[in-house]
Image (cartoon, grey):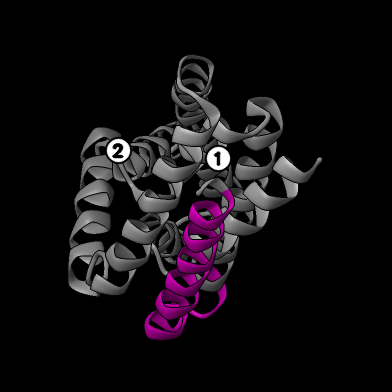
Amino acid sequence: MQSLFVAMGLVFVAEMGDKTQIVALGFGARHRLAPVLTGVALAYMCTNLVSVLIGGLLGATLPTRAIGLAGGILFLGFAAWTMRGGMSPAEAEAEIEAETAKLEAEAGGAVITDRRLILSVFSAIFVAELGDKTMLATATLAADGNPVLVWFGATIGIIMAGALGVVVGRFFGARLPERTTRIGSAILFLVIGLALILENL
């Protein structure tokens, strides 16, 4: 169960203020809540499944100590990556505008169906999440722990963070404080990275 709770907490905090959460926030501000949340949840479930499969395969082929040390170094890298910053508000706005324009063009001026909205949100979040630090962190945790529990934990954590972004976007139409969430995520990555390195020296 430790793998589940570690993955859930880590991914939830790491996703706060991340580019995919900003995209989810933007969709929540512009479109109906239920289909946006559905698209977000499906996208995160799929990206986490890919991460866990990769991490599980690596974990089965590499020595445990090497995985721990490599994971620690990766988490230190994630800390630096997080502090560097992610997608700017202008970039997020442009991405959401493009997806909304695409939806409206496909609908031909008609009301956008829930299915089209779900697919649009899914594709935007899935593509934005590929290669992201939370995806790499999930793969690292799966290589060092129970892949199934890591998938459940990471999926719960990232859906909670995405849903928070959607709800905030829906009701407030504003971003979460980027600097605070970025620093919090970086500190968490730093602590876990150091812990993994010390544990495996």
Labels 1 & 2 near each other (Cβ < 8 A) = no
Of labels 1 and 2, earlier in sequence is 2
User: Which residue is at a point 48% across and 74% down the rendered structure image?
Assistant: 187
Q: Residue furthest front?
A: 201
Q: CA distance from mark 1 to mark 2?
A: 21 Å
Residue 46 pos. (x, y %): 49, 28
Residue type, label 1: Leu
Residue 19 placement, left or right of 11: left
Residue under numbered circle 2: 127
The quadrant holding residue 50 is top left
Rendered position, 201 above or below 29: above
Instruction: Please tell me which residue lies in front, 72 or 10.
Output: 72
Residue density around tag 2, few if under 14, some if 14–19, many if 20 or more, within 10 Å: few
Q: Residue furthest right?
A: 1
Is residue 188 on the magenta stretch?
yes
Instruction: Please tell me which residue lies in front, 69 or 15.
Output: 69
Residue 76 pos. (x, y %): 37, 60
State the SS at label 2. Answer: helix
Rendered position, 14 above or below 139: below
State the SS at label 1. Answer: helix
Label for residue 24? none
User: Which residue is at a point 25% across and 63% down the rendered structure image?
Assistant: 92
User: Which residue is at a point 61% across and 43% down the rendered structure image?
Assistant: 154
Q: Nearer the viewer, mark 1 or mark 2?
A: 1
Q: Looking at the rendering, in which quadrant would you find the N terminus?
A: top right
Residue 198 pos. (x, y %): 53, 57
Residue type, label 2: Val
Residue under numbered circle 1: 141
Q: Which residues are magenta?
A: 170-199
Rendered position, 120 above or below 190: above
